[in-house]
Image (tube, helix red, strand yellow):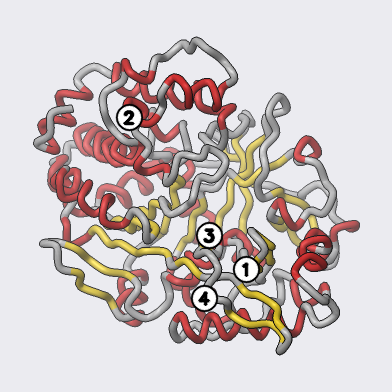
Amino acid sequence: MKAMLDPSNPQPLDLTDFATYINSCLGLAKRRLKKYGDLEEVAEAENGLNAYPRLKNLSEPHDIFVIDEQSISAKEIGEAVQALLDGKVLLEHTCAGEATRLGLGTKYLINPRLDLTGEVMQRLTGQRAWPVDPMGLSSMSLGRRHMLQLAWDLGSLASDNNRDPDKVLKSQHLLVIVNEATVTSVEMDFHEARFYGFDPAKVLFMVQKSFHGFNKGRQGWFYDTSSPLRLHNHGQMLLQTTMEGQIYRNEQGTKERLPWPTFRSLLEGFDDKISFNIEDLDYLSHSLDITGLAAALKLGAQGARMVMEVVTNNPENPQKGGACFWDPKLERNVMVESFQLGDIANSEIIYLNKNINHYPNPAVALSTARDRGLSMPLAVKGGYLYFQPVQGDLNFLLPTAYVRRATLRPIHSWKSGANTIPALQAMAAQEKRPGFLAWASELTGLKL
């Protein structure tokens, strides 16, 4: 049974369309859960069903590439800058998560002035006073701040290199992944903000599909369309990007869908794909990690097709997330998702995935995901079964390099109520940058 969930050897999935994907999931449920009489038994066994098969043999990772001035040359930094300025890096923004720990809906649309009332702030922080008053911030969502920061930093990089900021913005390709509940709001946000200076023809969208749960009746497992719709985690999001017609443009309110071969051909033109996370708070002060990109391009030239950065867990507030270990059977470092770690406590996780992954020569990574699928962990939620594939499990299927900074720093992201005050401080610092709000208003045509 455990071998069926080995991320290095996933069971095949039929990604022809959503119906075939559901049939694949149903087949997995029938095979893996034969001995369980009902969902309550599955829920009780969930940790064991999802556990990494070689959990007891894992040890501290080996030979992590250290990013510093000795390992990355000035020439390599220059090459990374040129790749960005020339639009050779696909910038992916993942905004589809349900943000269940905050209880505020999709993070892209969270606007502190509107959503962080005094009552909500007390719930999130356990405090009655805060160093930053949400009502004192400009009325902008986290997603708007995210996109403005990217445009600001790219414009600054262009100016520093004697390039036209407007032309550099127009050369970029973005992939924005949203969920079904917020797609209209996010699309409207881009149209209202004049696409933040980017070329609408080069801003691609995808709506991550949500699915009903599986149930068990007298005839066995079945797809229960009366159950709530839920996302199948970020692994399904990755798989969906390789499915027919899921990527689209929306220039004038009309969706132009890209066939998979067209999207794959587009991917072949990029040196790297960076997957950003909307909750990364460091992004609000510097969205472009040139040194990290230089490292990814260097490692990509050496054969890596996925580059994952590790950071130290915060000992005062340890978080869930993928953890990096050495697997002696595979003779390589691996990144294992938190719910595959059995009874290991958050405080025992030393190295976390920073969740900003690079995919040098991205056509290889996405073609591999389409051809091989991913391991399919499961979860019982609200009395129904849902699958929870992990995007990071692609590290088991690709030549993957792991990197860390010479100075390790804890993760700085808005994952829970405990991170709310740092999130507000990051937003306030962004607004106080000289000229930022005036520039943002001119770029978007909006009063900010």
Q: What residue is drawn where x is 20% and y is 51%?
A: 188
Q: Are marks 4 and 1 in contact (CB under 8 Å)?
A: no
Mark 4 or 1, closer to the camera: 4
Q: What residue is drawn where x is 32% and y is 74%?
A: 263
| Front residue (pair 410, 208) | 208
Up/down of 335 relative to 16, above or below: above
- Report, in whole angstroms, how far the alpha carbon at label 2 lies from the one at label 1: 34 Å
- Report, in whole angstroms, how far the alpha carbon at label 3 lies from the one at label 4: 22 Å
The first of marks 3 and 1 along the sequence is 3
The first of marks 3 and 4 along the sequence is 4
Mark 3 or 1, closer to the camera: 1
Instruction: Give the SS element for disc 2.
Output: helix
Q: Position of residue 105 (x, y in %)?
A: 44, 44
Q: Position of residue 176 (x, y in %)?
A: 34, 56
Quick one: label 3, few (<14), some, or many (20+) residues within 10 Å? some
Q: Which residue is mark 2?
A: 114
Q: Which residue is mark 3?
A: 234
Up/down of 193 relative to 23, above or below: above
Q: Which residue is mark 4?
A: 225
Amino acid beneath label 2: Leu
The first of marks 2 and 3 along the sequence is 2
Amino acid beneath label 4: Thr
Quick one: label 1, few (<14), some, or many (20+) residues within 10 Å? many
Mark 2 or 4, closer to the camera: 4
155 vs 128, left or right, is: left
Identify the mark at residue 253; answer none if there is no mark.
none
The first of marks 2 and 1 along the sequence is 2
